[in-house]
Amino acid sequence: MSRPSETAGVWLAHAERIQSTDNGDRWPEDILREETMAILGLDDLAPLLDTTPPLDQAGALAAAAAWLASRDRRGPSPDGDDAGARIRR
């Protein structure tokens, strides 16, 4: 079981790789990325990119869909994060 910050880091790395192949406008995604990095205390994504195995866009989206499907919408996430409960309050 990974910590929520590790899970967020993996998804940040996948998102960064996907967006690096897209020449389009990165707003509002870059704002969310910057806010998430600040919450996690990150200044640079390079260490996350170095430690997160690469997935192609379809693989990353399939993994994200499977992760979301595994979450209990009524309680804590499978990796111990209780963000859903905090949001519902």
Image (cartoon, rainbow, N blue to C red):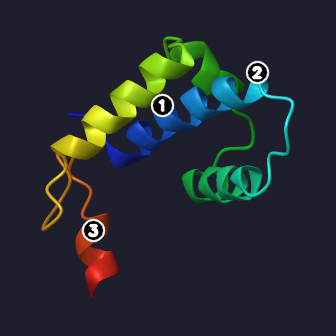
The residue at 53%/16% (across/down) is 51
Distance from disc 1 to disc 2, alpha carbons, whole Å, reads 18 Å
Q: Quadrant of residue 88?
A: bottom left
Circle 2: residue type: Thr
Mark 1 and 3 residues: CB-CB less than 8 Å, in contact?
A: no
Residue 3 falls left or right of residue 10: left
Residue that numbered label 2 is attached to? 21
Q: CA distance from mark 3 to mark 2?
A: 31 Å
On screen, residue 56 above or below 63? above
In the rendering, at what x and y percent does residue 18 appear? Answer: 65, 26
What's the residue type where badge 3 is placed? Gly
Residue 3 to residue 59: above or below: below
- Kindly identify the residue that appears in the image at 66 percent across and 44 percent down: 42
Q: Which circle, 1 or 2, is nearer the viewer?
A: 2
Q: Which mark is residue 84?
A: 3
- Determine whether the residue tagged by mark 1 lies in a helix, strand or loop: helix
Q: Residue at x 13, y 65 (%)?
A: 75
Q: Residues within 10 Å of mark 2 (few under 14, many from 20)?
A: few
Q: What residue is shown with label 1?
A: 10
